[in-house]
Image (spheres, rainbow, N blue to C red):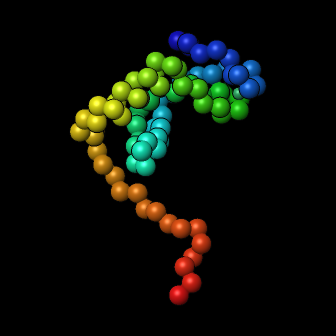
Amino acid sequence: MNQYNDCYYCGGTVKETNSSREIWWKETLYILEKVPIGVCLQCGEKVLKPEVAKEIDLILKEKNKPHKIIEVPVYEYERAVA
Ligand SMILES: [Zn+2]
């Protein structure tokens, strides 16, 4: 089952995978797991179907209890000089 057009960039075959997607929304990082995302087998370009993008919007707006919450370590690239 392949509902994707060939890759927009390189013409390669786009195959659907279930991947995680990170989304920054209103300064909060959300991670969605098991999102059906098309990935070009040739160049790795990711393609999101419009209905999937819409569903992600809904999930973020509904703000139901998340599946889980993880901690994310944050570093600054530049080391602080004491
Ligand atoms: Zn491609």
Which of the pair 78/5 is nearer the observer? Answer: 78
The residue at the far front in this view is 26
Q: Is residue 29 in view?
A: no
Which of the pair 33/61 is nearer the observer? Answer: 61
Which of the pair 10/26 is nearer the observer? Answer: 26
The residue at the far right in this view is 10
Residue 78 position (above or below residue 61): below
Query: Which of the 4 image quarters holds residue 26?
Result: top left
**20 on left or right of 43:** left
Residue 54 in picture, x, y percent from top left: 43, 23
Residue 73 position (above or below residue 62): below
What residue is rendered at 50% in x and 66% in y?
75
Ligand 1 resides in the quarter of the picture at top right
The residue at the far left in this view is 65
Query: Which of the 4 image quarters holds residue 7?
Result: top right
Residue 63 in picture, x, y percent from top left: 28, 36
Residue 20 position (above or below residue 4): below
